[in-house]
């Protein structure tokens, strides 16, 4: 039985003229100790998917599909049952540490809060556990830092605090949504190492969301590429690095500047996409795809197996593969 | 358009707009004609109950209540407009100067504003009456003076937020001087906030004018005003409570209307601005 | 073509930190300590550093938005901060800036035409027709259409807004464009588009860029010379390929190591945060440096040439250089 199973998740949000489907047919599976990455650009729906899994979408959002935690379908359950899971069995780390922390409360209190809510520890016990957690996430002088306010800490330190909060109740799953995008490069490295190390130590499952391919490539075992609210390619990470089947994945990799690669000739680029509202039925990537054909727009391409546990949603995979072979990225 | 979504967001504006336009309508109507003259004393017909002739009855001196209400709206509106105009004009100027110059200028302006807040409008009205005698002018000056620090604070705070934005830096890089930057970039961007504040202050000005007239510091007899109607009704509170009720409701509805209007405008402008992505 | 376009000489800039209470004296933070550099025409220069390194402060000083506490900034030989206001305003046409946030750098209440034409409006003496022509030409040179000039910023995407910002920067035909993190806020495929555009514009208009970024790869793509900043100081300076292959400063090495690589990585064991701000004497990096010695705490190393064209501010620069295997 999988720890987390999402089947055919669809998220709709209200717009000017009724509900609009933003995320379509997401299916994924997370087992204990497994690490999964969701990569895509802004607007691809990855953050919405993460929020849906913990049921933190705005009230007007409509969800359909199945979100099962340890086999139990959570979607129809009332909010107080979700509350028991959030922060307790699933920990979440967001991108902006400053908005995740209450500027008016000392961080010791904030780290202790999930402990007091979910595990019923009393104030002193929670406090010493909070100290232990701050220590564990690598904050120097943890005992004194308990009294510090968020604005007295640096960006990297604040993110460590949010990680401590997420891990306080020893969750089974950690969801990290762009945990390092707002941080300096050297701090990014530290925070990623921290997350990866803790996940390994506690044998947690990790769902890491990022627009940065390098971050995903280094950290997770399985990668899902999202575009336009759909999963367009899914593969074990080493396979994805070796063999990019979907045109969007290829374009993403090709657009990456490799440091130390010298002053190359022009970067390959994609045409600018049109806004989501104008998307025709069919492949969401059709507007920008260099391999686009009229058939691409008539129906959404189903997943096609490309290798072991590797699938891509495209009807022109063979053409794409040949082009890839001819001009390796 | 999803009708349900539209109406719930628009509700404050619609309701507020209707209520807020009442005093305007009343004032306009009264400028043209009123059922009876609001100043004509008619003792034999005093304290009449509402009837088909006098829709709201008459007061202690036989004057038609409805006509008094309609004419009283003139004063409220006049004072409201003038006082808010004073506040906007001088307050925004001060606030912008404070935000643009920073340093001791900002401190000075803000401390003056604090003084302005601390000084009760009623007290200044009393002083003005002592110097100039009674009249609407006193109300306008007293309430207007109180509005200046309000707008100074609001415009300074909003302007400060705008000054941190990159497009201000870009304008400086382009070579624009501070005056052009304030006029072309800062003012248009703080306008929504100012509009909202102005509608709220308008409602408050009506309330303040009523208070001043009630105390006899504003509109002088025979000029009809809602506040003085309340004062006149006070001694007859148990005999004819309706005499206090009608002007009271008029004041309350006007203030409510302007508050709702201000809230509604703010809500309407907010998502549009934040949808700017 | 060898006279420097821009010369920064021994710039120092201090800021007062927020005081905790009325009675404490305000602490001064040294945003820039004795920074010097030279830009020659058509050789683009990159500034790499993290938050707190002083790179944005330096950009603001170069753009004459703030005054340095010490030192001079010479543009084409003229000390910018000594010029009388009207003359400085006139000179501004030669150096323009592109900002990081595509959503904040355009006034949401102005139409594109007015935004792009702003630098011209500030300079005198152009007829409305000339102005319009210049605006259209600028929009087209960044890949937008003449019709776009009637629209408002919110009608455009992030990448398109950066193009508008570029058009604004180009319209006065500047010699120098300072670009502060021009692509960080954009998605990867759009980043590539804008970087290509920057390259093309450089070739077409003979521009010189001062590119500020935390991203080494972006700087390498566009610049002929790179300087790494830390705590208000330039700690290393070299052409980009030399910098990558043989970094001569421990901080540069750390930056390079921090870059995500496209392969699975074992997390480092040391996860405790780096504590400590730079002290007032000695090398600012001493608190975090693996090579630190007594000498480092006592003397702030000057920026010296390690090899031809390669400068480093480290007492042990040659050791660091020798140690590092090239990452190719």
Image (cartoon, helix red, strand yellow):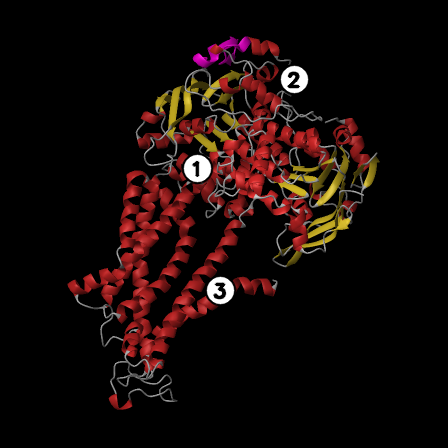
Quadrant (top left, top right, bottom left, bottom right) of the N terminus of chain B: bottom right
**Quick check: A217 left or right of C16?**
right
Q: Does the magenta-highlighted stretch encompass residue C145?
A: no
Q: Mark 3 sits on what residue?
A: B12
Q: Mark 1 sits on what residue?
A: B170
Between B107 and C280, the one lying in front of the other is C280
* The residue positioned farthest toward the bottom in the image shown: B44
Label 2 neighbour load within 10 Å: few <14, some 14-19, many 20+: few
Q: Secondary structure at mark 2?
A: loop
Between A157 and C241, the one lying in front of the other is A157
Placement of B37 over or under C274, stated as above or below: below
**Quadrant in the picture for residue C246:** top right
Q: Residue at x 32, y 44 (%)?
A: B98
**Quadrant in the picture for residue C119:** top left
Label 3 neighbour load within 10 Å: few <14, some 14-19, many 20+: many
Placement of B117 over or under C43, stated as above or below: below
The answer to whether mark 3 and mark 1 are in CB contact below 8 A is no
What stretch of residues is rendered in magenta?
C295-318
Q: Mark 2 sits on what residue?
A: C327
Placement of A313 over or under B233, stated as above or below: above
Q: Is residue C207 visible?
A: no
From the top left corner, tell me how far across and down residue A35 is, in percent.
72, 35
**Quick check: A50 left or right of A155?**
right
Q: Secondary structure at mark 1?
A: helix
In front of the other: label 1 or label 2? 2
* The residue positioned farthest toward the left in the image shown: B131
Q: Does the magenta-highlighted stretch encompass residue C310?
A: yes
**Quick check: A213 left or right of B24?**
right
């Amino acid at each position: 039985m999988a720890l987390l199973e999402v089947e055919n998740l669809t998220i709709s949000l209200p717009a000017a003229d009724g509900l609009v489907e933003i995320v379509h047919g997401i299916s994924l599976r997370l087992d204990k100790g497994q690490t999964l990455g969701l990569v895509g650009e802004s607007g691809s729906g990855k953050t919405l998917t993460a929020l849906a899994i913990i049921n933190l979408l705005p009230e007007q959002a409509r969800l359909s599909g199945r979100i099962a935690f340890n086999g139990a379908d959570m979607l129809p359950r009332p909010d107080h049952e979700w509350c028991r899971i959030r922060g307790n069995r699933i920990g979440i780390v967001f991108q902006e540490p400053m908005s995740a922390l209450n500027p008016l409360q000392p961080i010791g209190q904030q780290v202790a809060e999930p402990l007091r809510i979910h595990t019923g520890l009393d104030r002193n016990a929670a406090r010493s556990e909070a100290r232990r957690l701050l220590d564990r996430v690598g904050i120097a002088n943890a005992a004194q830092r308990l009294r510090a306010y968020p604005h007295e800490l640096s960006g990297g330190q604040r993110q460590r605090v949010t990680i401590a909060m997420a891990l306080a109740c020893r969750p089974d799953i950690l969801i990290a949504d762009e945990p390092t995008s707002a941080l300096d490069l050297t701090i990014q490295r530290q925070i990623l190492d921290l997350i990866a190390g803790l996940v390994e130590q506690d044998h947690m499952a990790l769902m890491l969301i990022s627009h940065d391919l390098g971050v995903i490539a280094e950290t997770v075992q399985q990668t899902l590429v999202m575009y336009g609210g759909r999963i367009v390619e899914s593969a074990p990470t080493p396979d994805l690095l070796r063999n990019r089947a979907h045109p969007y994945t290829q374009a993403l990799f090709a657009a990456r500047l490799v440091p130390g690669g010298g002053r190359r000739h022009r970067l390959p680029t994609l045409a600018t996409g049109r806004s989501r509202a104008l998307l025709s039925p069919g492949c969401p990537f059709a507007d920008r795809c260099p391999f686009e054909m009229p058939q691409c727009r008539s129906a959404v391409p189903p997943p096609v197996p490309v290798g072991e546990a590797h699938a891509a949603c495209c009807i022109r995979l063979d053409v794409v593969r040949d082009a890839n072979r001819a001009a390796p990225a | 358009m999803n009708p349900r979504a539209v109406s719930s967001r628009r509700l404050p504006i619609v309701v507020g707009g209707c209520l807020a336009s009442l005093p305007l309508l009343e004032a306009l109507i009264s400028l043209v004609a009123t059922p009876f003259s609001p100043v004509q004393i008619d003792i034999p017909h005093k304290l009449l109950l509402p009837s088909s002739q006098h829709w709201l009855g008459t007061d202690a001196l036989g004057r038609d209540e409805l006509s008094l209400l309609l004419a009283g709206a003139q004063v409220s509106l006049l004072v409201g407009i003038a006082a808010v105009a004073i506040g906007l004009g001088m307050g925004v100027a001060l606030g912008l100067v404070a935000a643009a110059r920073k340093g001791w200028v900002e401190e000075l302006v803000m401390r003056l504003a604090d003084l302005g807040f601390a000084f009760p409008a009623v007290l200044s009205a009393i002083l003005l009456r002592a110097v100039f005698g009674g009249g609407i002018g006193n109300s306008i000056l007293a309430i207007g003076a109180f509005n200046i620090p309000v707008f100074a604070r609001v415009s300074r705070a909003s302007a400060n937020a705008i000054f941190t934005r990159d497009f201000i830096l870009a304008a400086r890089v382009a070579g624009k001087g501070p005056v052009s930057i304030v006029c072309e970039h800062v003012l248009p961007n703080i306008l929504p906030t100012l509009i909202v504040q102005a509608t709220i202050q308008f409602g408050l000005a009506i309330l303040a004018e009523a208070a001043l007239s009630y105390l006899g510091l504003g509109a002088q007899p025979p000029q009809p005003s809602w506040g003085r109607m309340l004062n006149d009704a006070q001694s007859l509170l148990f005999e004819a409570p309706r005499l206090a009720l009608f002007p009271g409701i008029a004041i309350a509805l006007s203030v409510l209307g302007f508050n709702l209007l201000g809230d509604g405008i703010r809500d309407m402008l907010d998502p549009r601005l934040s949808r700017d992505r | 073509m060898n006279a420097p376009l821009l010369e920064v000489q021994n710039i120092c800039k201090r800021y007062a930190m927020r005081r905790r209470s009325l009675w404490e004296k305000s602490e001064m933070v040294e945003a820039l300590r004795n920074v010097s550099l030279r830009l020659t025409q058509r050789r683009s220069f990159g500034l790499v550093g993290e938050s707190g390194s002083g790179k944005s402060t330096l950009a603001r000083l170069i753009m004459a938005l703030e005054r340095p506490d010490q030192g001079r900034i010479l543009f084409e030989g003229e000390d910018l901060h000594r010029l009388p206001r009207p003359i400085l305003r006139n000179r501004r046409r030669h150096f323009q800036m592109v900002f990081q946030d595509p959503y904040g750098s355009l006034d949401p209440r102005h139409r594109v035409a007015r935004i792009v034409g702003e630098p011209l409006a500030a300079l005198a003496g152009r007829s409305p027709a000339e102005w319009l022509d210049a605006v259209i030409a600028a929009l087209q040179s960044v890949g937008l259409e003449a019709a776009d000039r009637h629209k408002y910023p919110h009608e455009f995407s992030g990448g398109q807004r950066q193009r508008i910002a570029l058009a604004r920067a180009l319209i006065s035909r500047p010699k120098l464009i300072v670009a502060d993190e021009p692509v960080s806020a954009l998605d990867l495929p759009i980043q590539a588009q804008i970087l290509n555009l920057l390259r093309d514009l450089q070739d077409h208009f003979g521009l010189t860029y001062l590119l500020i970024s935390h991203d080494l790869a972006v700087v390498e793509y566009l610049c002929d010379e790179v300087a790494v900043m830390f705590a208000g100081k330039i700690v290393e300076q070299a052409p980009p390929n030399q910098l990558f292959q043989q970094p001569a400063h421990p901080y540069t090495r750390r930056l390079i190591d921090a870059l995500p690589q496209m392969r699975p990585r074992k997390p480092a064991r040391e996860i405790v945060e780096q504590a400590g701000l730079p002290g007032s004497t000695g090398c600012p990096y001493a608190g975090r440096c693996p090579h630190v010695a007594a000498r480092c705490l006592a003397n702030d190393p000057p920026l010296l040439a390690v090899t031809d064209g390669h400068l480093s501010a480290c007492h042990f620069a040659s050791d660091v250089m020798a140690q590092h295997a090239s990452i190719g």
